Amino acid sequence: MLEEYKSQQGVERGFRFLKDPWFMVDSIFLKLPHRVEALMMVMTLCLLVYNLTQYKIRARLKEQNETLPNQLNKEVQNPTLRWIFQLMENIAIVRFYDASKQLIKECITNLTDLRKKIILLIGDTAAAMYGLIIQKNCTGGLEM
């Protein structure tokens, strides 16, 4: 019975995340029951993706024997995804256009070594999205 009670902690932590002011759920107003149900379904899916991403990053940190700094700048292998999101803030895309408004170049700014490390921990798809690796597409060509 104690084991079952302790297993609820993960679910409660997820709902604590949803009630956090940083998540800004209090700014959403819905009246119709089917819209509330739809929002709950989307939020549950988001919570699932959130937990899976946090699990994946923590597992990769352990298997690669790596760490990330926490809020106190102490190296840990179990950071929360919320903290990782805060570490990833301020990454931007800068686009350069010519006089005819044609895109010349696109650059991702504010990619520090720590942010690159986090992106690589998430996986090859994320790394390719940020231009950290070149990924082969299904026809054998290269994509950036």
Image: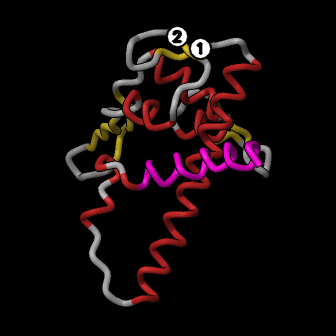
Q: Position of residue 37 (x, y in %)?
A: 49, 80
Above or below 120: residue 55: below
Q: Position of residue 51 (x, y in %)?
A: 60, 46
Q: Going by the image, does 21 lie left or right of 74?
A: left
User: First in sequence: mark 1 or mark 2?
Assistant: 1
Which residue is depicted at the point 50% across and 36% down?
A: 81
Q: Which residue is mark 1?
A: 67
Q: Position of residue 98 (x, y in %)?
A: 25, 43
Quadrant position of residue 35: bottom left
Evaluate if marks 1 and 2 touch, with contact meaning CB atoms under 8 Å apart: yes
Please name the amino acid that badge 2 sits on. Glu
Q: Residue 4: which disc?
A: none
Furthest residue toward top: 74
Which residue is depicted at the point 47% across and 15% down?
A: 69
In the picture, the quarter occupied by the C terminus is: top right
Q: Nearer the viewer, residue 72 or 124?
A: 72
Magenta region's main secondary structure? Answer: helix
Q: Nearer the viewer, residue 49 or 136?
A: 49
Furthest residue toward left: 99
Q: Which residue is mark 2?
A: 75
Tell me if residue 42 is in the magenta stretch: no
Which residue is depicted at the point 61% across and 19% down?
A: 77
Q: Going by the image, does 15 lie left or right of 54?
A: left
**Magenta-colored span:** 1-18
Give the structural element (helix, strand or loop) at label 1: loop
Above or below 30: residue 50: above
The Cα atoms of the two marked residues, 1 and 2, are separated by 5 Å
Quadrant position of residue 120: top right
